[in-house]
Amino acid sequence: MIGLTRRTGEQCRLDPDTIERVEAHPDTVVFLTDGAKYSVCESVDQIIRRIRDDRAGVIAACYVLDRGEDADPMGLGRATLTAEAHAPAPVIPLRRH
């Protein structure tokens, strides 16, 4: 969910998967797939950034669930594993007698 501010000052949260399009007339309007529309204070670029950050968070959470460790491909956080640690183990062929 991404947080946005309606023109009335009310805070709202929207599921980015339900956003169909965002238009900037004089005001920024978010159109949802169910036909609802919201006039918000944020710019189109701010909304896109929030959608991107939300989706990146989902991908990182899936990575943690799959690998059991934090993903930090850019080395910005506290990752301690090298890229080689994420590589699959070498395949050792079995001998047939």
Image (cartoon, helix red, strand yellow):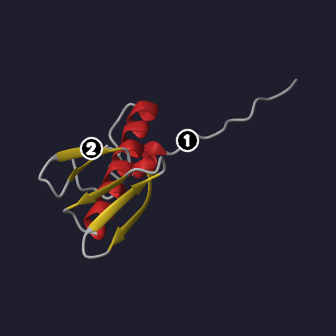
User: In what quadrant of the picture does the C terminus appear?
Assistant: top right
Place of residue 96 in the rendered image (x, y in percent of width and height, measured from the top left) = 85, 26
User: In what quadrant of the picture does the N terminus appear?
Assistant: top left
Query: 20 or 91: nearer the eye?
Result: 20
Q: CA distance from mark 2 to mark 1?
A: 39 Å
Image quadrant in which you'd find residue 28: bottom left
Task: Kindly identify the residue that appears in the image at 51 percent across and 45 percent down.
Answer: 87
Query: Is residue 80 shown to the viewer in this render?
Result: no
Three-letter amino acid code of the residue under disc 1: Pro
Residue at image mark 2: 13
Three-letter amino acid code of the residue under disc 2: Arg
Q: Which secondary structure lies at badge 1?
A: loop
Answer left or right for 18 relative to 89.
left
Task: Kindly identify the residue that appears in the image at 23 percent across and 59 percent down.
Answer: 40
Place of residue 71 in the rendered image (x, y in percent of width and height, measured from the top left) = 35, 45
Q: Earlier in the sequence, mark 2 or mark 1?
A: 2
Residue at image mark 1: 88
Task: Kindly identify the residue that appears in the image at 31 percent across and 75 percent down.
Answer: 25
User: Which numbered mark, 2 or 1, is in the foreground of this view?
Assistant: 2
Figure check: 46 above or below 8: below
